[in-house]
């Protein structure tokens, strides 16, 4: 991932490929590397895939919320001179994508949600470990996946470092509170853009009924299940995630 990592001004991002822009929005746990499969696959198929590093831990505390992370995406698109993009969001990233779409639907060609927050209040605060020893953190990180071995040592180390960094813990809690405040249930019926919901059948963070609610509330959404899969389908089953998404993009001429 590092070879494609670019820092310009206040923006850091990975980028590959040429064509229709796809912007990938990561969640709280695990950053850009979760999406390596998406980056490698779609960048070779006529898309410019861009994964910005969201400033979850670097915004001033009072600005650490869904609204300002959505504003950051707007600034990033302006900086990159992207008028219209396909957005892919996992977990908190999905929530940021939804909030952005609420106010900037003309800039969104399509929205892909995987394990997205935005409807289900418990999804961020309760499952993100606040503290604990390494073994406990390891267990909590592994619980996010159907197959616990998907949680690499690197990822567990990153989560462990975060929960032992007071600065990061305070911001994680601020984001979780903000996610509850910005529940999107009332807004979804007005979002008339093509939406693709790809959900782990065994997601313990945002359970399957959340995906069903998203499909019910969004006016133009297709729902696809990934079997034996937890909260991060693009990481746990990258080939299947890419296949589902590629077929959907073709069907929708995106």
Image: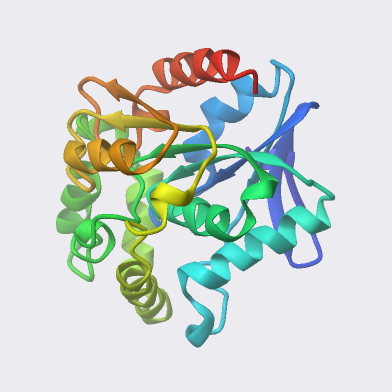
User: Residue 14: x and y, percent?
Assistant: 68, 43
User: Residue 175: x and y, percent?
Assistant: 39, 71
Q: Which residue is at the front of the view, 79 or 249?
A: 249
Q: Could you tell me which residue is drawn at 33 percent across and 44 percent down? A: 217
- Name the quadrant of the C terminus: top right
| Vertical position of residue 73 compared to residue 115: above or below | below
| Vertical position of residue 137 compared to residue 49: above or below | below
Q: Which residue is at the front of the view, 233 or 183?
A: 183
Quarter of image, res 124: bottom left
Q: Which residue is at the front of the view, 182 or 157?
A: 182
User: Residue 144: x and y, percent?
Assistant: 23, 43
User: Residue 176: x and y, percent?
Assistant: 32, 69
Q: Could you tell me which residue is drawn at 24 percent across and 36 percent down? A: 212
Look at the image and name its color scheme. Answer: rainbow
Residue 112 in view, yes or no: yes
In the image, taking residue 140 as reference, residue 124 lies left or right, namely: right
In the image, taking residue 68 as reference, residue 16 lies left or right, namely: right
- Name the quadrant of the N terminus: top right
């Amino acid at each position: 991932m590092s070879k494609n990592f670019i820092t310009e001004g206040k923006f850091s991002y990975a980028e590959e490929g040429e064509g229709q822009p796809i912007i990938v929005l990561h969640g709280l746990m695990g950053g850009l590397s979760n999406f390596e499969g998406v980056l490698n696959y779609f960048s070779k198929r006529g898309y410019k895939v861009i994964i910005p590093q969201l400033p979850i831990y670097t915004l001033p505390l009072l600005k650490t919320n869904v609204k300002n992370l959505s504003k950051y995406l707007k600034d990033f698109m302006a900086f990159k001179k992207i008028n219209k993009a396909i957005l892919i969001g996992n977990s908190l990233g999905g929530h940021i994508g939804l909030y952005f779409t609420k106010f900037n639907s003309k800039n969104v060609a399509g929205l892909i949600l995987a394990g997205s927050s935005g409807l289900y209040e418990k999804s961020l605060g309760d499952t993100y470990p606040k503290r604990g020893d390494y073994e406990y953190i390891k267990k909590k990180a592994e619980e996010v996946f159907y197959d616990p071995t998907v949680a690499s040592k690197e990822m567990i180390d990153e989560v462990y470092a975060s929960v032992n960094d007071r600065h990061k813990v305070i911001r994680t809690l601020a984001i979780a509170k903000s996610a509850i405040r910005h529940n999107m249930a009332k807004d979804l019926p007005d979002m008339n853009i093509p939406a693709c919901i790809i959900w782990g059948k065994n997601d313990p963070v945002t359970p399957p009924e959340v995906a069903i609610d998203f499909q019910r509330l969004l006016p133009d959404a297709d729902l696809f299940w990934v079997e034996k899969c937890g909260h991060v389908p693009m990481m746990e089953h990258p080939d299947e995630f890419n296949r589902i998404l590629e077929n959907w993009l073709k069907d929708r001429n995106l």
